[in-house]
Image (spheres, rainbow, N blue to C red):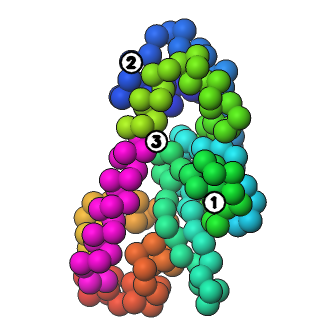
Amino acid sequence: MIAPLLSHIQKYVPLTHEEQEVIAQYVQCLTVKNKQYLFTEGAPCSAQYFVIEGCLRMYFIKENGVEQIIQFGIDNWWISDYTSLTLNKPSQFYLQAVQPSKLFVLKKDKQEALFEHVPKLESYFRRIYQRAYAAAQTRQIYFSDLSGEEKYHHFATRFPDFIQRIPQYMLASYLGFTPEFLSKIRAKK
């Protein structure tokens, strides 16, 4: 069952058989149901989640009561509230399954011990964080420079299969507009 995670790690750093066995001891497998929460606003985030299959969404609720999705976690992607996790602060976000999902969980209290046993995982996670940060920066450019229609078409071109996996209102939230506006864009096709 740990094969997808080990395969992902080995795209970035080579692992010995012994290191693979150590990693298997430090992560736990978790199956979550559709709409199940992994954490909610105000609660601390105490783990990182690797999506084996399925989809998670991280969102916050704006002052006007509207949900704003800031990130999706899909197959072979890590997701967490890194501010809460790193600074031991209550989360400002909700992390919820969009579909039934299978995950690996790496608890914060186990991470340092895992790094001591498999030091090259620090390099792996650094690379993962760099990629995630780069994706966030790129997303910021698109949100600053593109019109709503351009944002949708750019996203649809880059992730055509993903658009079919999530409800339209969630895609609209992620892209920063209303479901009605998204409907109008899609109707122009």
Residue shown at the point (46%, 42%) measured from the top left: 76
> What is the span of residues highlighted in magenta in the rendered image?
128-148
Task: Tell which of 25 and 54 is nearer to you.
Answer: 25
Question: Residue 168 at x, y = what percent?
Answer: 47, 76
Please give the name of the residue rendered at 49% of the width and 67% of the height, measured from the top-left corner: 70
Residue that protrudes farthest toward the right in the picture: 43
- Left or right: residue 16 versus residue 21 is left
Give the mark nearest the N terminus, 1 or 3: 3
Q: Which mark is residue 20?
A: none
Q: Residues within 10 Å of mark 3 (few under 14, many from 20)?
A: some
> What is the count of numbered marks?
3
Q: Nearer the viewer, mark 1 or mark 3?
A: 1
Query: How far separated are the C-alphas under marks 3 and 2?
Result: 17 Å
Q: Amino acid at mark 3?
A: Asn
The disc labelled 2 sits on which kind of residue?
Pro
Amino acid type shown at disc 1: Leu
Mark 3 or mark 2: name the one nearer the start of the chain.
Answer: 2
**Residue on which disc 2 sits:** 14
Give the position of the N terminus as an image quadrant. Answer: top right
Q: Quadrant of residue 91?
A: bottom right
Q: Nearer the viewer, mark 3 or mark 2?
A: 2
Task: Give the residue number, with chain letter if any, for mark 3.
Answer: 76
Q: CA distance from mark 2 to mark 1?
A: 31 Å
